Image: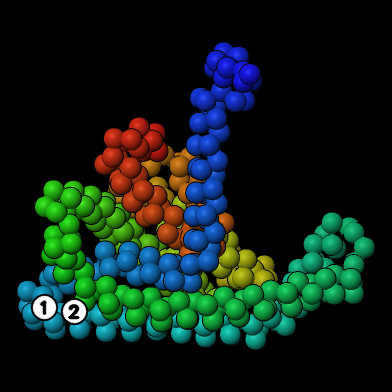
């Protein structure tokens, strides 16, 4: 005789249907997260420049609308695309040339570093470490040379790829709404276009003012460093502009890197001291006056969420991920806010 099936009360706890369903859901979520992480890592060479081109397109579209009224659609796209591609490739070449020059100056930087180490040792009363300090510093500089050149080559390559993507995005952007309406039923197409319009408005507003605020900071930084005689002023200005898009961590890197280079290059003279004081003033004005006035609460995310997004995308895609962290998180929150099942989560992620 077969025994009758056990009732839910008689089953072990781990075999309870509700427990089994919870475990299955958790397993599916973990598998989905792992698969998404793996795909994002593998597709990084394609997705990173594509997303950068998309967000640059948001900045350029208003200029395209103004230019189209004057010279017509095809001519406006051609002029804007060619100028944008030229600027991107030019900036990539400038960064590459500056990094090459920086690598050539590493022996002098090494000597300056040794002099500063010996000065600190004399002031602190410690015995000079001599050859050991020199060997350690030379080893660290040799380790940094390879990644530095690789980074410069990657920047130049990514700039060329972004320029190509941006050209096609500008050509196809105006046709996207008509294609969506042809591909989907009317109700579904309207829903997609409404979400896209919300995303477009939020990202365009954020990027437009962020680009202006970053330029207002980067241009004086470059002028100050050039006036103080600090080499590679253009490189430090570009670094300041890019780092200003990275919350919290970016301004520290943008300030500390040129200041550290200036002290390492000149020693404790008036040039690095003056540059440090003026750069501190520029960053303080930007953080306390310029950005709050221009940006306000345009992002709409809590600081904790911004730090989490910065850590996630930075770990996944490095510096490019940190640059894209805020826009990508804003897009995710807007999309989640549109659906009932994820609306509560989007409200949790918003600040204020």
What residue does disc 2 label? 77
The answer to whether marks 1 and 2 mark residues whose Cβ atoms lie closer than 8 Å is yes
Badge 1 crowding class, 10 Å Cα cut-off, few under 14, some 14 to 19, many 20 or more, is some
Quarter of the picture containing the N terminus is top right
How was the colour assigned to the protein in this rendering? rainbow
Percent coordinates x, y for residue 166 in the rendering: 31, 75
Q: Quadrant of residue 74?
A: bottom left
Quarter of the picture containing the C terminus is top left
User: In the displayed image of the protein, which residue is found farthest to the front?
Assistant: 1
Q: Residue 28 vs residue 137: left or right?
A: left
Percent coordinates x, y for residue 213 in the rendering: 34, 59
Q: Which type of secondary structure does the marked residue at label 2 adopt?
A: helix
Asked whether the viewer can see residue 91, the reply is no
Q: Identify the residue at horizontal 65%, vertical 86% (top origin).
A: 104
Q: Nearer the viewer, residue 261 or 345?
A: 345
Q: Could you tell me how many numbered marks the image carries?
A: 2
Residue 5 - label: none
Q: Identify the residue at horizontal 56%, vertical 68% (top origin).
A: 258
Q: Quadrant of residue 102?
A: bottom right
Percent coordinates x, y for residue 210 in the rendering: 33, 58
Badge 2 crowding class, 10 Å Cα cut-off, few under 14, some 14 to 19, many 20 or more, is many
What residue does disc 1 label? 73
Q: Which type of secondary structure does the marked residue at label 1 adopt?
A: helix
Q: Nearer the viewer, residue 305 or 194?
A: 194
Q: Nearer the viewer, residue 78 or 105?
A: 78
Say above or below: 55 vs 193: below
């Amino acid at each position: 005789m077969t025994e009758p099936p056990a009732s839910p009360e008689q089953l072990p706890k781990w075999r309870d249907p509700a427990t089994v369903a919870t475990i299955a859901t958790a397993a599916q979520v973990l598998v989905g997260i792992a698969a998404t992480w793996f795909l994002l890592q593998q597709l990084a060479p394609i997705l990173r420049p594509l997303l950068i081109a998309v967000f640059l397109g948001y900045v350029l579209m208003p200029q395209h609308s103004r230019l189209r009224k004057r010279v017509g659609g095809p001519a406006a796209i051609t002029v804007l695309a060619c100028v944008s591609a030229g600027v991107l490739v030019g900036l990539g070449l400038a960064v590459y040339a500056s990094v090459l020059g920086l690598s050539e100056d590493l022996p002098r930087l090494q000597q300056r570093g040794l002099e500063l180490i010996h000065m600190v040792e004399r002031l602190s009363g410690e015995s000079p470490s001599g050859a050991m300090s020199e060997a350690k510093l030379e080893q660290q500089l040799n380790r940094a040379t390879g990644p530095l050149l690789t980074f410069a080559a990657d920047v130049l390559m990514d700039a060329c790829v972004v320029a190509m993507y941006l050209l096609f995005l500008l050509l196809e952007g105006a046709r996207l709404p008509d294609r969506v309406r042809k591909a989907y039923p009317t109700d579904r197409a309207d829903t997609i276009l409404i979400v896209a319009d919300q995303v477009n408005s939020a990202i365009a507003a954020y990027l437009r003012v962020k680009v202006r605020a970053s330029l207002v900071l980067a241009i004086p930084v470059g002028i100050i460093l050039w006036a103080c005689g600090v080499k590679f002023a253009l490189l430090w200005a570009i670094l300041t502009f890019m780092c200003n898009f990275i919350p919290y961590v970016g301004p520290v890197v943008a300030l500390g890197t040129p200041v550290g280079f200036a002290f390492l290059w000149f020693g404790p003279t008036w040039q690095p001291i003056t540059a440090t004081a003026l750069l501190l003033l520029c960053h303080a004005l930007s953080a306390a006056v310029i950005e709050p006035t221009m940006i306000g609460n345009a992002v709409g995310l809590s600081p904790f969420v911004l730090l989490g997004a910065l850590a996630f995308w930075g770990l996944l895609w490095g510096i490019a991920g940190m640059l894209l962290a805020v826009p990508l998180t804003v897009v995710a929150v807007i999309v989640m806010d549109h659906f009932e099942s994820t609306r509560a989560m989007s409200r949790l992620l918003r600040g204020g």
